[in-house]
Amino acid sequence: MSKVLMKGNEAVGAAAIAAGCRYFFGYPITPQSEVPEYLSRELPKVGGVFVQAESEVAAINMVYGAAGAGGRVLTSSSSPGIALKQEGISYLAGAELPCVIVDMMRGGPGLGSIQPSQTDYFLATRGGGNGDYRLLVLAPSDVQELVDLIMLGFDLADEYRSPVMVLGDGMIGQMMEPVEFKEDLKREAPEKPWATTGTKGQRKPNIINSLYLEAELLEEHNIHLQEKYAKMREKEVRVETYNIENADLVFAAYGTTARIVKTAISKLEEEGYKVGLIRPITLFPYPYDTFKNINPNCKGVLTVEMNAGQMIDDVKIAVEGKIPTYFYGRTGGMVPGPAEIADKAREILGGVR
Amino acid sequence: MDERIIIAGFGGQGVMAIGQMLTYAGMIEGRKVSWLPSYGPEMRGGTANCNVIISDKPVGSPLVEEATSVIVLNKPSLDKFEGNVVKGGNLFINTSLIDRKSTRDDINVYYIPANDIATELGNPKVTNMVMLGAYLEVTKVVSIESIYEAFGKVFGETKMHLLPINKEAIERGAKLAREQIKVEA
Amino acid sequence: MAVIFQKTRGLTDVPTHYCPGCTHGIIHRLVAECLEELGVLDDAIGVAPVGCSVMAYKYFNCDMHEAAHGRAPAVATGIKRVRPDNFVFTYQGDGDLASIGTAEIVHAAHRGEKISTIFVNNAIYGMTGGQMAPTTLVGQKTTTSPYGRDKETQGSPIRMSELLATIEGAVFVERVAVDTPANIRKAKKAIKECFQVQIDKKGFGIVEVLSTCPTNWGLTPPEALKWLQKNLMPYYPLGNFRRPEEVK
């Protein structure tokens, strides 16, 4: 299939339809409104359903209903709306329902701004709702990867019976890049014998539930969930690395920030610096082990984020105190430029080339 | 090739559209491309701009800070982005709406009365195409054929009947730029 | 041996957790009987609320979802949009529907979702121990209105059926009570008619059922029924507020 130029938000919708998603429930919010706009236009053409809910809270609970009834279902929002969805996300995790949730992050806290940001890292990776749960969190850095991860996300959601979050930002949502829909990514959704379809008088009722009033049963359920998360940690880590064995300084960055860091890396290399990059593609599970391959004489790991320092907590866990860690971030919707990132790197390297 | 472009003007002047046409044309010619818009309330009546990258290398940052070319359709945009042109780069100024000259002497500046030409052609909406024509003539980043192909992609096949007037606007812009290109001794 | 009477197939054999004298049991049975008699039990997908009937998913003999507090109509919307040929109903109390879930019920009605809602109104929060509900009467003492509900600061009780009947998409709205055998028969008739509206794909339907809470009202079951008649019925008049033929 040939390439088309698409806006990130529209690519989300196109990828979802290509992945067999036929149900979308959402509420408009900048900078992701092109997702519901696109799907309101395109889903009816393929026999799908688009519902503009009365709120993000209602939308995620519609997702809970639709996923429980066996539908391949998507919702999307941006930071303040994702905060509202936390109730339903916790229920989805508890009831083990598959769905894909897209968060095109914007500046916060509160109403914040509508400009690109990465302030929902904690919310996404630590479970923003109540209870001990995790989401599979995928972080694309360009529009093609956004498409690929949306499609993969639906498969992973079904495989693990877990909500999957695709964590983008206003920049990837709004920008246009060439994309290609790779047919081989499409897989058949598995049978869902647990879904509510009506008993037809032929089986016992299926119950979609996260309530376990007996502590023993709830602990058992939690142990089961943790085993599932352990399996994700073992099998689903995805990461891009560049030159980490030889670098004097390794960057850690994800999403759109990582591509800005790549431009900074080109500048630094032209000046003779040896720098590398770890770009986590899955934020949960986090690629902790990758940091073990960093040049042991490296002067530090510089985490760059569009926030005040969130992923750096995982970087610190990963380096186990063996390598100094540094941070550079911009907040409020300010996007760091390659020049300022390179400046910070030069400061740490102190002339080491 | 590593062309990094900022296109800026009022919302409604079509700066986003010519950015998309350049991006599409770049893609058609097999380059790595990206298009990044400013977004938000500023789109309605305020200033709008987009960053376009057309390159032989994968696009890192889609943000353009050091622009090889800047196209400005109104005065606030000139004030804001004049400083972003790299030394030796190009600045295209819509003199119909901008009454000052560039203060830079280390770049190539082209003065194009784009609104006047568009009005002359009978359609003020093609102002952006006049600027695009000037830009293409100077930089030759993509071929004019690719731009015409991109027109249908950006505006939809139903708008192809408008291609002739847009072509005319592009050619007029190109002609003006050609007259201003400095002949190196 | 000839079978004269048997329990409806619409209920499981799980003993309910409801307090003695609580009318939830009667309402469960009416809902289950209607599902069975209309032939939709095997296609039914129910949504249980948060509140006293939180464990309704164990009692109805059909596929069930347990929803977050107040969100049952949103959950039912999701189910119905995926399975338009199944019968989808919610079973909600007054805290769930009339307080935390007002947005969800109003907008499910407003979209004309083809679902049916059973709304059990006993003017108090039972599950959490007798706190004030939006439907608590003025002057009624609860654990969070210990001096009696004060109209000045806590407002007047909300009449959900009347409110929902103003919404175009709500094509069946009726208030019933389960205080006497005669009213129980009327309640069943209303529930059946409400369910038929969904089967006929006409729109959203709701039956509000005035119910008792002897435990938290501090009354014996017979006293509770009398209290319902004397206090709830005058404020919440029984009757039909909307039928499909009245909808333009």
Image: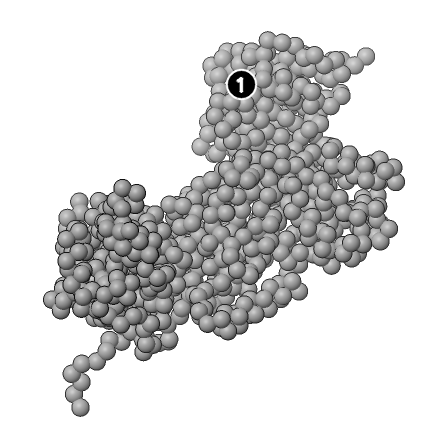
Relative vertical location of residue A335 with respect to residue C33 in this rendering, above or below? above
Mark 1 is surrounded, within 10 Å at the Cα level, by few (under 14), some (14 to 19) or many (20 or more) other residues, namely many
* Secondary structure beneath label 1: helix
**Marked residue chain, label 1:** B
Location of the N terminus of chain B by quadrant is top right
Viewer can see residue A297: yes
Q: Is residue B90 left or right of residue C35?
A: right
* Nearer the observer, A277 or C8: C8
Q: Residue at x 53, y 43 (%)?
A: A79
Looking at the picture, which amino acid does disc 1 mark? Thr
Relative vertical location of residue B135 with respect to residue C61 in this rendering, above or below? above
Name the spot of residue A134 as percent of width and height, x first: 57, 59
Name the spot of residue A172 as percent of width and height, x first: 59, 41
* Nearer the observer, A261 or B170: A261
The quadrant holding residue A251 is: top right
Q: Is residue C53 left or right of residue B31?
A: left
**Colouring method of the image:** one colour
Q: Is residue C38 left or right of residue A106?
A: left
Q: Residue at x 54, y 23 (%)?
A: B47
Relative vertical location of residue A25 with respect to residue C224 in this rendering, above or below? above
* Nearer the observer, A301 or C181: C181
Per the image, the residue denoted by label 1 is B127
The quadrant holding residue C142 is: bottom left
Q: Residue at x 31, y 52 (%)?
A: C145
Location of the C terminus of chain B by quadrant is top right
Name the spot of residue A240 as percent of width and height, x first: 71, 51
Q: Residue at x 58, y 66 (%)?
A: A226
The quadrant holding residue A155 is: bottom right
Residue lying at the far bottom in this picture: please name it. C1
Viewer can see residue C109: no
Name the spot of residue A135 as percent of width and height, x first: 56, 57
